[in-house]
């Protein structure tokens, strides 16, 4: 059996930043990279499966011919904001395994749009004849070709970032931010820089028992899920041979043939690695999407990897660690578009009969981008640190008008309800304070 010591594992996972800090609870932004035009139109709706009406989660919604895009939430709902000058444009709706649909903006209503997508049928010739024989060799080739298939120019991206904490099914904390991502060339070893433009938060500590939960890393948790830019977080030159790669049934994305590769750690490898699916464009050997999770069967080891700090009289361990990354293309070049990190874990107190079950989700979607003509990165003092705890940087929901022009991921109904509830509580608290002598 191939195993590693705890010390070796810490070295191996030195770059893993999906870290939780569990602690006891006790009672100058830069100019925004992109400015929308003064006038804009807003379109809301739902993306669903045409056959069964089920919501399509994380469907991509793009304004054709532009860099403007967003994504549907976990209920299939989307919200797209378009500058008035582009009101004659066409919106493209796409989802893995479904036929892409194009809709002109004039055919969309401001609200209650239902966009149904049909599953794409694959011909046997596409599945059996074109598929390569060696799945691992195909993935290696995909990594080698990143310089020709992905953005080579430094790019300045606008992204919307959200992280949520739930105790069982109840929302506990919500933090959101608009950030500038200074994306370096995919063939460069230079890391991307992130700059916080504006953030807001809301936390209901009454649902947290006696523990406050904080997610360390903020937007970097999602940014480093970009496998093409940061392959060493999952596949190093040495560890890639610790996996078995096999072909699954092919599919389609944006009407293009996509090879689906399953990967899983070899049976003789005891070190917790990853398992999941890679979606590779058949024509140009480009990774278009990846969905995977961490093997956390070793509860003690998993806890050491993810829990930064906790009380002595409590055990904490993750029960699920899952990731997703999606790429988009324009003019034959691909770029990072969306990523998601889900962490579920249990908190077991010595003096309590039942465990507490929590889930934390972090997601980030690129909503606009342009070439970084100068290639310059922000000054170090203006950059977000990888140790950031966004909920401590955000100032609260005191600026509701800020989000007016910027594309965001539509909040889930449960999250939106929690926001409104807390806003009412804040207003009542202000009125109560003002009435006191």
Image: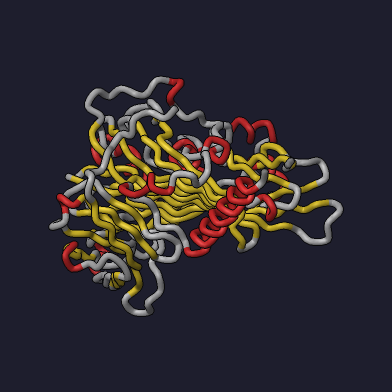
Residue 267 visible somewhere in the drawing: no
Position of 342 compared to 213: left or right?
A: left
Q: Position of residue 236 (x, y in %)?
A: 47, 36
Position of 13 compared to 116: left or right?
A: right
Seen from the viewer's position, the closer of residues 125 and 285 is 285
Q: Position of residue 83 (x, y in %)?
A: 21, 50
Q: Is the N terminus in the top left, top right, bottom left or bottom right quadrant?
A: top right
Residue that protrudes farthest toward the right in the picture: 351
Is 318 rendered above or below residue 36? below
Is 353 rendered above or below residue 9? below
Is 389 rendered above or below residue 66? above
Q: How is the image coloured?
A: secondary structure
Q: Residue at x 22, y 67 (%)?
A: 108
Q: Position of residue 89 (x, y in %)?
A: 15, 56
Seen from the viewer's position, the closer of residues 437 and 329 is 437
Residue that protrudes farthest toward the bottom in the picture: 51
Q: Is the C terminus in the top left, top right, bottom left or bottom right quadrant?
A: top right
Q: Residue at x 52, y 63 (%)?
A: 414
Q: Residue at x 54, y 54 (%)?
A: 423
Position of 86 compared to 296: left or right?
A: left
Q: Residue at x 38, y 79 (%)?
A: 52
Residue that protrudes farthest toward the front in the picture: 437
Q: Residue 62's quadrant in the figure?
A: bottom left
Is 289 rendered above or below residue 241? below
Residue that protrudes farthest toward the left in the picture: 88
Seen from the viewer's position, the closer of residues 29 and 325 is 29
Q: Residue 185's quadrant in the figure?
A: top left
Q: Position of residue 270 (x, y in %)?
A: 64, 46
Residue 17 visible somewhere in the drawing: yes
């Amino acid at each position: 059996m191939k195993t590693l010591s705890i010390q070796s594992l810490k070295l191996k996972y030195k770059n893993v930043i999906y870290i939780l800090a569990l602690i006891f609870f006790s009672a100058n932004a830069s100019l925004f990279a992109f400015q929308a035009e003064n006038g804009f139109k807003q379109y809301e709706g739902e993306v669903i499966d045409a056959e069964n009406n089920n919501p399509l989660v994380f469907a991509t919604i793009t304004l054709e011919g532009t860099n403007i895009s967003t994504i549907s939430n976990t209920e299939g709902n989307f919200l797209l904001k378009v500058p008035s000058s582009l009101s004659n444009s066409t919106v493209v709706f796409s989802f893995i395994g479904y036929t892409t649909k194009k809709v002109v903006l004039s055919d969309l209503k401001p609200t209650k749009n239902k966009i149904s997508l049909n599953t794409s049928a694959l011909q046997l010739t596409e599945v059996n004849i074109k598929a390569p024989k060696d799945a691992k060799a195909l993935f290696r080739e995909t990594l080698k070709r990143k310089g020709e298939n992905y953005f080579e120019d430094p790019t300045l991206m606008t992204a919307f970032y959200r992280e949520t904490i739930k105790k069982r099914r109840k929302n506990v904390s919500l933090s959101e931010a608009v950030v500038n991502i200074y994306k370096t060339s995919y063939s460069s070893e230079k890391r991307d820089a992130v700059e916080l433009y504006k953030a807001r938060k809301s936390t209901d500590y009454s649902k947290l028992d006696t523990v406050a939960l904080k997610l360390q890393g903020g937007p970097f948790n999602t940014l480093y899920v970009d496998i093409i830019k940061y392959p060493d977080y999952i596949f190093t030159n040495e560890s890639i041979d610790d996996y078995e790669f096999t072909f699954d049934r092919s599919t389609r994305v944006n009407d293009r043939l996509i090879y689906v590769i399953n990967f899983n750690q070899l049976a003789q490898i005891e070190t917790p690695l990853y398992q999941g699916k890679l979606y590779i464009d058949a024509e140009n050997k480009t990774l278009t999407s990846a969905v995977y999770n961490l093997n956390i069967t070793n509860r003690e080891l998993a806890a050491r990897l993810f829990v930064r700090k906790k009380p002595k009289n409590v055990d904490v361990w993750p029960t699920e660690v899952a990731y997703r990354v999606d790429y988009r293309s324009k003019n034959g070049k691909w770029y990072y578009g969306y990523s998601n990190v889900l962490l579920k874990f249990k908190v077991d107190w010595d003096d309590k009969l039942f465990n507490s079950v929590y889930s934390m989700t972090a997601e980030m979607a690129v909503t606009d981008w342009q070439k970084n003509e100068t290639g310059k990165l922000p000054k170090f003092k203006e950059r977000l640190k990888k140790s950031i705890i966004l909920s401590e940087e955000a100032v609260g929901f005191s600026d509701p008008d800020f989000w007016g022009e910027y594309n965001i991921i539509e909040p889930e109904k449960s999250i939106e309800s929690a926001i409104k509830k807390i806003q009412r509580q804040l207003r009542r608290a202000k009125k109560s304070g003002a009435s006191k002598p």
